[in-house]
């Protein structure tokens, strides 16, 4: 069965008035549009665009079992548009989430909590804009010490702490605790004059963040992180424990269905420093850029973005002229069009999707045909290797 999906954009302050609107071919919005959610997440389930008035979670509860859909979807698919930086954050592993959720269940009513559920939240984002900026993971320590040396005495108290991974984690806790308020101020003030050929892009990014969040300790935490610019079609995979923040751009995001977020700066929201440090992986590492690879059977025009998690798999299908992609679902799918015009056909019906429109496909559809002239992303549960894809015709 094929069901057309729609949803209203969420108006977080960091969103863009134009990015999602331009993708969908409409005038800029009057307020920021940050995310459009496609899925059955209870915080904002998709609406069925069939006149029924149902949301996807309600339809699954009422009709899903008859079409092979049982329980909640393990993933959530989003369009994300950032015009200013999101909060620095990290997500727990499955084991950490289960332990912490159980622990917090014993807290008295009204006590502050960090965990909304017992699930992990690995996530992947693919750039749709020509340029997508992000902070992903922690930079190698030698490189960070070289960058901080350009700040002179202003950054020396921080630089001295960066002796090893434990020192790096301790430094992040120190910055966020409030005890380093004077150092944060000194480093932020010095940003205007610091020069470094090696780290010019990182410093320019930090200056911009400092304008958005003056004297926020997250500005200095950001200086410890890898700054990356994704080109259209490139992605990053963010595993448990990896500190990250999106800075600007439009992308397709796919994640495990969870609300568990520990924040580490650049936010007015609560920061639990001790809990953040408990789940943070302080291992410095290069940016985890993921490039698409051919579908498992070598089909032209069909690519997958490798992510070794059981919750989701992400494919990109590009068709043109007389080409047709044949997808054989191994679970419930969501197809999201992002370019041109694509047609999604099942055994008894088909849907035409313009950019920004989506369809839910139940697993009792033995075969799904995608045709037209455009691009679509496909989300499903499980390993990408479980999805069989073939291609007829040529793709430009």
Image (cartoon, rainbow, N blue to C red):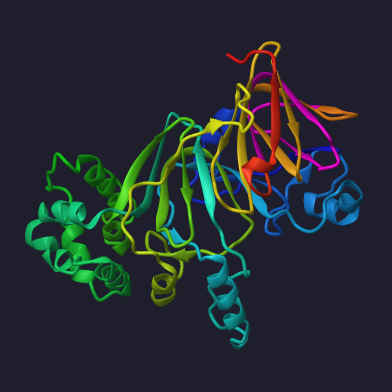
Residue 23 visible in the snapshot: yes
> What quarter of the picture does the C terminus occupy?
top right
Question: Residue sitting at 83 percent across and 27 percent down?
Answer: 350
Relative horizontal placement of residue 185, taking residue 135 as reference (left or right)? left
Position of residue 86 relative to residue 354, above or below, is below
Q: Position of residue 48 (x, y in %)?
A: 80, 43
In the image, residue 178 lies in the stretch drawn in magenta? no
Question: Residue sitting at 12 percent across and 48 percent down?
Answer: 194
Relative horizontal placement of residue 159, taking residue 16 as reference (left or right)? left
Magenta-tinted stretch = 351-379
Question: Residue sitting at 7 percent across and 57 percent down?
Answer: 152
Question: Residue sitting at 79 percent across and 49 percent down?
Answer: 56
Position of residue 223 relative to residue 379, above or below, is below
Tally the numbered discs: 0
Q: Position of residue 157 (x, y in %)?
A: 14, 68
Q: Position of residue 32 (x, y in %)?
A: 52, 44
Residue 18 visible in the snapshot: no
């Amino acid at each position: 069965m094929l069901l057309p999906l729609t949803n209203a954009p969420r108006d977080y302050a960091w969103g863009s008035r134009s990015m999602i609107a331009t993708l969908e071919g409409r005038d800029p919005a009057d307020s920021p549009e940050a995310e459009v959610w496609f899925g059955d997440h209870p915080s904002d389930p998709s609406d069925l665009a069939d006149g029924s008035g149902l949301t996807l979670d309600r339809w699954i509860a009422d009709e899903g079992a008859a079409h092979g859909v049982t329980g909640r979807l393990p993933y959530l698919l989003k369009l994300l548009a950032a015009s200013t930086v999101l909060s620095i954050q990290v997500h727990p592993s499955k084991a950490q989430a289960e332990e912490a959720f159980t622990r917090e269940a014993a807290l008295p009513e009204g006590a502050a909590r960090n965990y909304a559920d017992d699930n992990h939240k690995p996530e992947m984002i693919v750039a749709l804009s020509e340029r997508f900026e992000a902070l992903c993971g922690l930079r190698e320590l030698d490189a960070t010490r070289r960058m901080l040396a350009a700040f002179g005495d202003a950054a020396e108290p921080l630089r001295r702490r960066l002796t090893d991974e434990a020192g790096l984690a301790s430094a992040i806790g120190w910055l966020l605790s409030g005890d380093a308020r004077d150092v944060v101020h000194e480093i932020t003030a010095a940003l205007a004059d610091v020069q470094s050929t090696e780290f010019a892009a990182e410093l320019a990014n930090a200056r911009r963040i400092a304008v958005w969040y003056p004297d926020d300790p997250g500005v200095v935490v950001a200086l410890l992180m890898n700054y990356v610019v994704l080109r259209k079609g490139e992605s990053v995979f963010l595993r448990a424990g990896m500190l990250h923040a999106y800075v600007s751009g439009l992308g397709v995001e796919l994640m495990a269905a969870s609300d568990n977020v520990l924040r580490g700066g650049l936010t007015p929201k609560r920061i639990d420093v001790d809990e953040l440090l408990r789940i943070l992986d302080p291992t410095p590492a290069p940016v985890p850029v993921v490039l698409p690879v051919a579908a498992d059977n070598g089909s032209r025009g069909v690519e997958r973005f490798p992510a070794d998690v059981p919750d989701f798999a992400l494919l990109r299908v590009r068709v043109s002229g007389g080409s047709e992609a044949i997808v054989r679902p191994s679970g419930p799918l969501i197809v999201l069009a992002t370019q041109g015009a694509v047609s999604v056909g099942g055994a008894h019906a088909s849907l035409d999707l313009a950019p920004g429109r989506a369809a839910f496909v139940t697993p009792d559809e033995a075969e799904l045909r995608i045709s037209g002239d455009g691009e679509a992303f496909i989300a499903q549960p499980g390993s990408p290797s479980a999805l069989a894809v073939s291609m007829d015709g040529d793709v430009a």
